[in-house]
Amino acid sequence: MKAAVNKQKVVSEAEWLKARKKLLVKEKKFMRLQEELGLERRSLPWVKVTKDYVFEGPNGKESFADLFEGRSQLVIYHFMFGPDDKSGCPHCSLRADGFNGINVHLKHRDVTMICVSRAPYKKLASYKKRMGWNFKWVSSGNTDFNFDYHFSFTPEDIAEGKAFFNYKFQDPGPTEREGHSVFYKDKRGDVFHTYACYSRGNELFNVHYHYLDVVPKGREENGRGAFWAKRHDESDQ
């Protein structure tokens, strides 16, 4: 339902402050709950990565361990860009506009963040240049990486309309899906999978939604998701 902002109650500054302080109590409670949830995420058990994956990136062939770039923590954004796609997903592109540039700060906290897609590296590099992004982007097209972590699906999965996605068997939708995976590398070089999120679980990382949620009209999506998303070089605004 569209927010009727023109019907909002107009009050004095004193009344507004009273209402704002009442909401502030809930906001602080929510923040504490977020902190508790963050602790639970970091307390999840780990799964050791035993498969050898070789990616294609700006440095040529790279092992999984290479992707950490000497750090112990790795965040991967699974960008929807399949081998046959001509360009990257507009929704993923919107999200990438939000996290482009943060890697320089994450590195100070022993974290490397990259994007991974199944499209050939040349396509990724070309699209990245077009968008003006500076994060690292590698291709997993010659590996089972995306399939093993349930971000890509076979033609048979799509035809059947059933695959393991977002922690249950369901219709995954398109062949490629978006999401985040987190990994840790210990001093011996062993790599562990520590966290992953899919679908709306990614809203935690959507900078645009956090801003839209505080403006009077809100998201105005009516259950349609980010139907309005466009690549920034295709926007008419």
Image: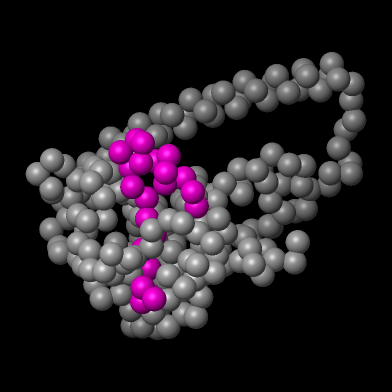
Residue 67, picture quadrant: bottom left
So how many labels did they put on this image?
0
Whether the magenta-drawn stretch holds residue 44 is answered as: no
Instruction: Report the span colored magenta.
Output: 100-122
- The answer to whether residue 66 is visible is yes
Q: In this view, does 87 lie to the left or right of 214?
A: left
Q: Who's the residue at 41% across and 29% down the image? A: 36
Residue 108, picture quadrant: top left
Residue in the foreground of this view, choosing between 176 and 115: 115
Q: Does 149 appear above or below 102?
A: below
Q: Who's the residue at 42% across and 46% down the image? A: 103
Q: Does 105 appear above or below 147?
A: above
Q: In this view, does 116 lie to the left or right of 47?
A: right
Question: Which percent across, then down, holds residue 85?
Answer: 46, 80
Residue in the foreground of this view, choosing between 236 and 41: 236
Question: Which percent across, then down, holds residue 35?
Answer: 43, 29
Dividing the image into 4 quarters, which one contains the C terminus?
A: bottom right
Q: Who's the residue at 55% across and 55% down the image? A: 97
Q: In this view, does 55 lie to the left or right of 99?
A: left
Q: Who's the residue at 69% across and 57% down the image? A: 222
Question: Which percent across, then down, holds residue 9?
Answer: 88, 33
Q: Does 141 appear above or below 25?
A: below
- The answer to whether residue 157 is visible is no
Look at the image and name its color scheme.
one colour
Question: Which percent across, then down, holds residue 119?
Answer: 38, 75
Q: In this view, does 18 lie to the left or right of 68?
A: right
